[in-house]
Amino acid sequence: MSEQQVGVVAAAGIDPPPAGTVPGVDPTEFVGRSPGQLAWLRLRRDKVAMVSGGVLVFFILLAVAAPLVARLYGKGPQERFPERLDRNGFPLGYAGVSGEHWFGIQPGIGRDIFIQIVYGLRTSLMIAFTAAVLTIALGVVIGIVAGYVGGWVDAAITWVIDLALAFPFYIFCFAFVPLAVSQFYGPRDEVSPWFRPSLLVLIFVLFNWTISARLVRGQVLSMREREFVDAARASGAGFGHMLFRELLPNLWAPILVTFSLNVPALITAEAALSFLGIGVLEPTPDLGRLLNDSVRYLRDVPSFTILGGTTLFLLVLAFNLFGDSLRDALDPKSNR
């Protein structure tokens, strides 16, 4: 085959015939690739995607295996070591770093910083993944219905989306979270450790479903007039079949990209709320609250702030880079 033919065949996602064969003699020598295989091929060739994906896998495995890590490390997230603190509450030595405490000791409280970061990763990822899955599910259903039905249904849903996008998120959190806690717990009651994380998930879903809904609605508006939709409608396909068997399978690429970019945004928002004191509080470990606790010791023990901040930065950066690479890999017009 000529170089031009090889280029055309490669661009079409088809493997060229082995060297020495006559072109066009045996069509079975050409192996076609599905869109998913082409996307995976582009993703594997992207070094940024491989590195950021490896970092994400490391963080996720570390968070999932947090109890096992604590058992092997020999220290729990609530365990304190007051003997490693001086009279002023500062760690002995350089930030308390030793062979037993890899990242040092938390000033004032005396907890191990490494195991706090591990369990903080678990809390942040659990909240972000749960909220992202529920957000995508709700947004996809609403977006498909709005785009396919149209009319007053589309107009009403679009109005609700615009209203939700215009609502101040952090002001709502400052007003709603304390009110919700006071409705279920008294001033002297101990708040359940799962209540605030569940409350954050609810708030994230309430505000973030609009992003995926607008994206899916726009895709469905351009897709509902295509031939395969007309053919399915003419064959007597029902409403549910049209939405979830005809339209939804053609939306997986933008949905997947939206999910990969939504998770780091939720991690950042959760950390910000916990840093401001209205998110996850004691005794649940959390990266945002860990940064809040470290600010007062920034001058004397800067490593405390640097370790927590670097972990959060690397986690969010890896998600963003992988999401960008995934978007490029799923784009059929991408040259990468």
Image (tube, rainbow, N blue to C red):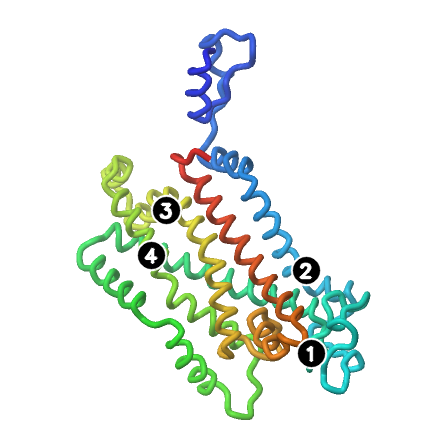
Which sits in the foreground, 179 or 264? 264
Q: Earlier in the sequence, mark 1 or mark 4?
A: 1
Q: Is residue 135 left or right of residue 227?
A: right
Q: Which is closer to the viewer, label 1 or label 4?
A: 1
The answer to whether the residues at label 1 and label 4 have Cβ atoms under 8 Å apart is: no
Task: State the residue at coordinates (59%, 76%).
Answer: 295
- Label 3: which secondary element: helix
Q: Which residue is mark 3?
A: 248
In the rendered image of this protein, does residue 208 appear above or below residue 330? below
Nearer-N-terminus badge (3/4):
4
Rounded to the nearest angstrom, the CA distance separating label 3 from label 4 is: 13 Å
Residue assigned mark 4: 213
Residue 222, placed above or below residue 103: above
Q: What percent of the width, then of the height, locates residue 256?
A: 44, 49
Amino acid tagged 1: Pro
In the image shown, does 132 or 289 lie closer to the viewer? 289
What is the three-letter code of the residue carrying label 2?
Ala
Left or right position of 16 against 90: left
User: To which residue does mark 1 refer?
Assistant: 107
**Cα distance, mark 1 to mark 4?**
45 Å
Please name which of the two marks, 3 or 2, marks the residue nearer to the observer. 2
Which numbered disc, 1 or 3, marks the residue that appears first in the sequence? 1
Q: Secondary structure at mark 4?
A: helix
Q: Residue at x 46, y 61 (%)?
A: 265
Q: Secondary structure at mark 2?
A: loop
Q: Bin the neighbour count of mark 2 within 10 Å (Cα to Cα): few under 14, some 14-19, many 20 and up.
A: some
Residue 150, percent from left and from top: 21, 53
20 to 48, vertically: above or below: above
